[in-house]
Image (spheres, rainbow, N blue to C red):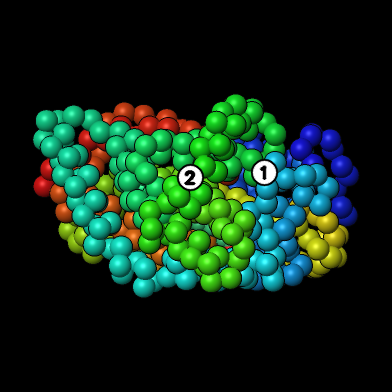
C-alpha cells in the first residue's frame, strides 16, 4: 500500500490521522510520537491503512513473536506478499526462520564479541588519528562539520576496512544506505530523489560484494569462507555481504552524528563525559535511545493476532516506531531528558528479538571510541550554527552539524 487511499478504520482502534513520512513529521517526529503513545497501545493510520505502535511494551511483544509478526513480507511499508520487492530480498533482514537462522548464525559469528576484541586496537588508532586532525583544526579556531568530518569520516574508514573493501568509491555506501532506508517508507519524493542514482550505486555495491573485491580475512571474505564450508551457497554469499554494506554504514554515521548533536545541545552532559571519558559507551547508548538513528521498521501479521485486546487481521502492516518507544514514559522516567548516567538497557534503537541488530557490538564500539577520543581532547563542544537535516523515511539524519570544539 503506497498510495494515499483511505481505508475505513477497523472498529475499536483509535485513529491517528498523520503522515509519519511527510517532511514536516520527519523534521519533528516527537509531537506525533507522543500522540501515538497517548492515543493507545495501538493506533490506525488511515493514510497508509496500517497499524502503528509507539509504546515500549507492545513493541517488545511484537518483536518477541516473530511467528505472528513476520519479516519476510518486508520490514518497510510495502507488502512483498502483494507487490514484488524493489530489490532482491535480504537473506537476513527480510527473512523468517529457518532461512533467517542460517544467515543469522553466520553473521553473528563474524560480528561476535571476540571479533570486537580483535578490531578494538585498530578502531581506536583510527579514532585517535581522526580526532588529532580535528584537534589541529580546532586549535586554528576552525568550525568543524560534525557530520562530514566525524560522523561520516570515521565509520566510512573503519567499517569498510574491516569488511575488506578498497578505499575508492566509499561515498557509494552513503548513497546506497540513503536509498535503502528511504525504500522502507512510501514512494514519496524522498525515495524518488535517492533512487535517481540507484543503478550506478547498486552496480558499485554488487560489484564490491564479489569475493575478488574483498580482502582475505575481512568480514566479507569470512562470509565466503562460510560458503566454502557449505553453510550457505556461493550465490548467497554476495547477498550477505550486501547486508553489511546496506546496514553497517549509514546507521552508525547517523548514530554518531546524533550523539554529537545530543552532547553539543547538553553542555552539562558533555562536561560529565569530558571529566570521565569512561562514560563514552553510556553516552552513546543514551543518544541512541534519545535520538534514535533508525526511527521505524514494519512487521506484517502472518495470522489473525490479538495485541492489547485489539484484533489485527492476517496480512496487516504494523509500524513499530522505535524512537517513540525509546521515549515512552511508561518505561523511562524523565524520558525527554538526555542523561548519560542513565543505563538505558532495553531500548529499541537496535530492535529486539531474533532480528535485533546483528552489528550492534560493532556499532557500540565505533560510538564509544569516537566519543572517548573527543572527550579526551576537548573541554567543550558547542553548536557553531544551525544544524541542517537530511530527511530520510527511516533514518534520523543530520545534513550538517557546525561545531566549535574547545581544546582541553
Ligand atoms: C547505530 C548503528 C545501528 C543501528 C541504530 C541499527 C539498527 C538496527 C535495527 C533497529 C535492526 C532491527 C531490524 C528489524 O528488526 O527488522 C537492525 C538489524 C540489523 N543490523 Fe543494525 N543497526 C546499526 C548498526 C549496524 C551495523 C554496524 C551493522 C553491520 C555490521 C548492522 C547490521 C544489521 C543487520 C545485518 C541487521 C539484520 C538482522 C536480522 O534481521 O537478524 N547494523 N539494525
User: Element under label 1?
Assistant: loop
Q: Nearer the viewer, residue 174 or 306?
A: 174
Q: Is mark 2 within 8 Å of ligand 1?
A: no
Residue depicted at 38% across the width and 61% down the height: 217
Residue depicted at 30% across the width and 67% down the height: 118
The answer to the question of whether label 1 and label 2 lie on touching residues, with beta carbons closer than 8 A, is no
| Position of residue 134 measured from the top left corner of the image (x, y, whole percent) | 19, 39
User: Element under label 2?
Assistant: loop
Q: Which of 358 and 243 is in front in this view?
A: 243
Q: Which of 270 and 21 is in front in this view?
A: 21
Quarter containing the N terminus: top right
| Position of residue 16 measured from the top left corner of the image (x, y, whole percent) | 73, 45
Q: Is residue 19 above or below residue 308?
A: above
Q: How many marks?
A: 2
Q: Is residue 172 above or below residue 339?
A: above
Say few, some or many: other residues with alpha carbon within 10 Å of mark 2 (under 14 / 14 to 19 / 20 or more).
Answer: many
| Position of residue 25 measured from the top left corner of the image (x, y, whole percent) | 59, 37
Determine which residue is flagged by label 2: 208
**Residue 368 falls in image quadrant:** bottom left
Determine which residue is flagged by label 1: 87
**Residue 284 falls in image quadrant:** bottom left
The residues tagged by marks 1 and 2 sit, at their Cα atoms, a distance apart of 17 Å
| Position of residue 58 measured from the top left corner of the image (x, y, whole percent) | 66, 65
Q: Which of marks 1 and 2 is nearer the N terminus?
A: 1
Residue depicted at 81% across the width and 52% down the height: 81
**Residue 369 falls in image quadrant:** bottom left
Asked if residue 288 can be seen in this view, the reply is no
Say few, some or many: other residues with alpha carbon within 10 Å of mark 1 (under 14 / 14 to 19 / 20 or more).
Answer: few
Q: Is residue 176 above or below residue 309?
A: above
196 left or right, relative to 221 = right
Asked if residue 101 can be seen in this view, the reply is yes
Amino acid at each position: 500500500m503506497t498510495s494515499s487511499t483511505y481505508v475505513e478504520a477497523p472498529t475499536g482502534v483509535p485513529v491517528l490521522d498523520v503522515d509519519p513520512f511527510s517532511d514536516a513529521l520527519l523534521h519533528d517526529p516527537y509531537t506525533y510520537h507522543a500522540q501515538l503513545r497517548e492515543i493507545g497501545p495501538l493506533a490506525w493510520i488511515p493514510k497508509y491503512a496500517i497499524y502503528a505502535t509507539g509504546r515500549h511494551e507492545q513493541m517488545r511483544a511484537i518483536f518477541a513473536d516473530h511467528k505472528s509478526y513476520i519479516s519476510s513480507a518486508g520490514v518497510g511499508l510495502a507488502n512483498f506478499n502483494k507487490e514484488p520487492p524493489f530489490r532482491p530480498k535480504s537473506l537476513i533482514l527480510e527473512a523468517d526462520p529457518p532461512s533467517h537462522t542460517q544467515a543469522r548464525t553466520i553473521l553473528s559469528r563474524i560480528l561476535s564479541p571476540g571479533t570486537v576484541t580483535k578490531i578494538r586496537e585498530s578502531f581506536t588508532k583510527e579514532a585517535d588519528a581522526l580526532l588529532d586532525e580535528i584537534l589541529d583544526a580546532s586549535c586554528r579556531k576552525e568550525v568543524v562539520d560534525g557530520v562530514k568530518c566525524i560522523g561520516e569520516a570515521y565509520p566510512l574508514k573503519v567499517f569498510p576496512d574491516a569488511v575488506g573493501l578498497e578505499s575508492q568509491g566509499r561515498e557509494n555506501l552513503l548513497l546506497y544506505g540513503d536509498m535503502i532506508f528511504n525504500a522502507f517508507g512510501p514512494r514519496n519524493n524522498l525515495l524518488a530523489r535517492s533512487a535517481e542514482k540507484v543503478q550506478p550505486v547498486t552496480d558499485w555495491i554488487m560489484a564490491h560484494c564479489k569475493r575478488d573485491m574483498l580482502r582475505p580475512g575481512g568480514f566479507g571474505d569470512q562470509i565466503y569462507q562460510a560458503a566454502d564450508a557449505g553453510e550457505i551457497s556461493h550465490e548467497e554469499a554476495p547477498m550477505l555481504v550486501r547486508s553489511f554494506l546496506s546496514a553497517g554504514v549509514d546507521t552508525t554515521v547517523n548514530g554518531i552524528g546524533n550523539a554529537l548533536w545530543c552532547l553539543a545541545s547538553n553542555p552539562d552532559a558533555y562536561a560529565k563525559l569530558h571529566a570521565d571519558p569512561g562514560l563514552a559507551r553510556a553516552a552513546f547508548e543514551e543518544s541512541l535511545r534519545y535520538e534514535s538513528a533508525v526511527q521505524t521498521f514494519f512487521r506484517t501479521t502472518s495470522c489473525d493476532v490479538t495485541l492489547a485486546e485489539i484484533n489485527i487481521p492476517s496480512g496487516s502492516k504494523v509500524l513499530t516506531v522505535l524512537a517513540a518507544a525509546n521515549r515512552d514514559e511508561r518505561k523511562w522516567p524523565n524520558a525527554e531528558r538526555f542523561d548519560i548516567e542513565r543505563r538505558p538497557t532495553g531500548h529499541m534503537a537496535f530492535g529486539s528479538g531474533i532480528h535485533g541488530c546483528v552489528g550492534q557490538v560493532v556499532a557500540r564500539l565505533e560510538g564509544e571510541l569516537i566519543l572517548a577520543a573527543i572527550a579526551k581532547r576537548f573541554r567543550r563542544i558547542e553548536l557553531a550554527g544551525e544544524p541542517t537535516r537530511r530527511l530520510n523515511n527511516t533514518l534520523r539524519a543530520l545534513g550538517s552539524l557546525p561545531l566549535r570544539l574547545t581544546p582541553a
